[in-house]
Image (cartoon, rainbow, N blue to C red):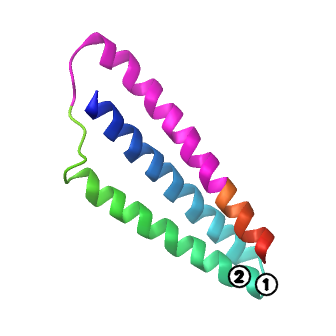
Amino acid sequence: MGDLISGFIIVLLLAFALLIFLAGLFTTYFGAGKSRKIGIALSVIGVLVGVLTYLGFYGPLKPECGGTFLNFIMAPLVYIIAAIVGAGVALLAFIGAIMKA
């Protein structure tokens, strides 16, 4: 069960990092002035979260394969849910940052 939770956290953070990075690039390219600066900051945050999560994946958070049939079914579902949650959080952070500009 611990492997499933650590996998959930990893996928959530990687989805967040990818989407916040892409949203930052989008804002940097199409924005002007303050929006462009916010886009650069979002891109940097996305890269930092992605790199730290990737490094954490090879450290203490590395999920190990269970082998039971329940893990075979539950793991992909948990990872899909984690990706959706991470994308939602990134979208909310993007909208919040743009609304402040």
What residue is shown at x 36% (from left), y 64% (from top)?
A: 51
Image quadrant where one finds the C terminus = bottom right
Name the residue: 53% across, 54% down.
16
Is residue 66 depicted above or below 80 in this figure? above
Q: Are marks 1 and 2 in contact (CB under 8 Å)?
A: yes
Q: Amino acid at mark 2?
A: Arg
Principal SS element in the magenta part?
Answer: helix
Count of labels in the image = 2
Residue at 63%, 69% (x, y): give it.
24
Q: Residues within 10 Å of mark 2 (few under 14, many from 20)?
A: many
Where residue 45 appears, x then y in whole percent?
51, 71
Assign a secondary structure to mark 1.
loop
Q: Is residue 51 above or below residue 74?
A: below
Residue 47 lies left or right of residue 39; in this view the side is left
- Chain part drawn in magenta: 65-91
Q: Residue furthest top?
A: 69
Q: Which residue is mark 2?
A: 36
Label 2: which secondary element: helix
Q: Magenta segment: does it hold 51? A: no
List x then y, in percent, for residue 83: 52, 41
Instruction: Say which quadrant the N terminus sits in.
Output: top left
- As displayed, is residue 52 above or below residue 72? below
- Which mark, by number, is residue 6? none
Task: Give the side of residue 14 with respect to residue 69, left or right.
Answer: right
Of 27 and 92, nearer the camera is: 92
User: Tag on residue 32?
Assistant: 1
Q: Residue at x 56, y 65 (%)?
A: 21
Q: Position of residue 58 (x, y in %)?
A: 21, 52
Q: Amino acid at mark 1?
A: Ala
Q: Is residue 73 magenta?
A: yes
The Cα atoms of the two marked residues, 1 and 2, are separated by 5 Å
